[in-house]
Image: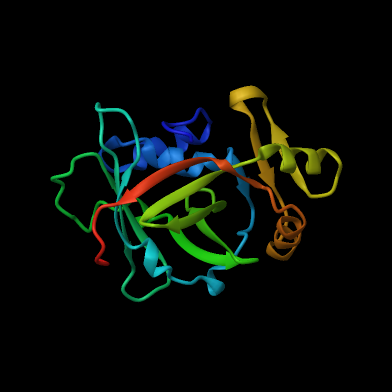
Amino acid sequence: MTTGALACPFLGKMKNRLCFNSIFILAIFLLSGCISFKNPIINYSDAVIDESLLGLWKESTDSNEYEDYILILKDDNNPKYKFIIFNNKDYKYDENDYISKSNLIYSGILENKKYIVLNYEKDNSYFFLEYEISNDTLRFFTMDTSLFENAINEKKIKGNIIGNGINKEIFINENTDSLQDFIKKNENIFDENEYIEYKRQIKENI
């Protein structure tokens, strides 16, 4: 199980956009291993609202020093989400606070697996994560970046690798159909033993 924010250049892009300067949203999307994509794994036209995602979630942690929450709401007119991040259980909802106000976040299904897709509006790049919900527990899984890195080096997919170590960034320049084909052939892109976990705090959808 992974906890805390991960080192990545994406931190510099996102840190000023976070509600209450909370960096734990980074831990969600940095699970993608700092791999960004020119195109989404699932097109927005194929997005579906997962009703089980909606509501209030609290990160599972042994630490007594902080309490991180995600409030997930659906947009009134479109198949996308509002992610509100806070670390105060007495927080009162403000519609201006949500992280996805200018960054499109939606979900979809591919090969019976569920994915969250983030479109980062500043450079129009995409990130995605596999997730699952069971027994009021939400898990976001860590991506195995080596599969993409090896595929680029072996010229199986188009992309660029910049930097090394914790400063490494990987950019995949493939269309959605090619991405889906790659994922179908590589079922273990996400490590089921590495994840960030949240517990549902209320059962009712908000």
**Toward which corner of the image does residue 51 lie, by quadrant?**
bottom left
From the viewer's perspective, tell me whether residue 112 is left or right of residue 13: right
Task: Using the image, determine if residue 8 lies above or below residue 155.
Answer: above
Q: Is 180 rendered above or below residue 99? A: below
Residue at (56% x, 52% y) in the render: 126
What x and y, as percent, mark residue 107? 49, 63
- Which x, y percent locates residue 29? 49, 44
Could you say which is closer to the camera, residue 102 or residue 35? 35
Query: In the picture provided, is 196 more to the left or to the right than 150?
Result: left
* Left or right of 187, for residue 192: left
Farthest top residue in view: 165
**Foreground residue among 192 and 93:** 192
Residue at left offset 48%, top offset 36%: 1
Residue lying furthest right: 154
Q: Quadrant of residue 136?
A: bottom left
The residue under the point 34% across, 42% down is: 59
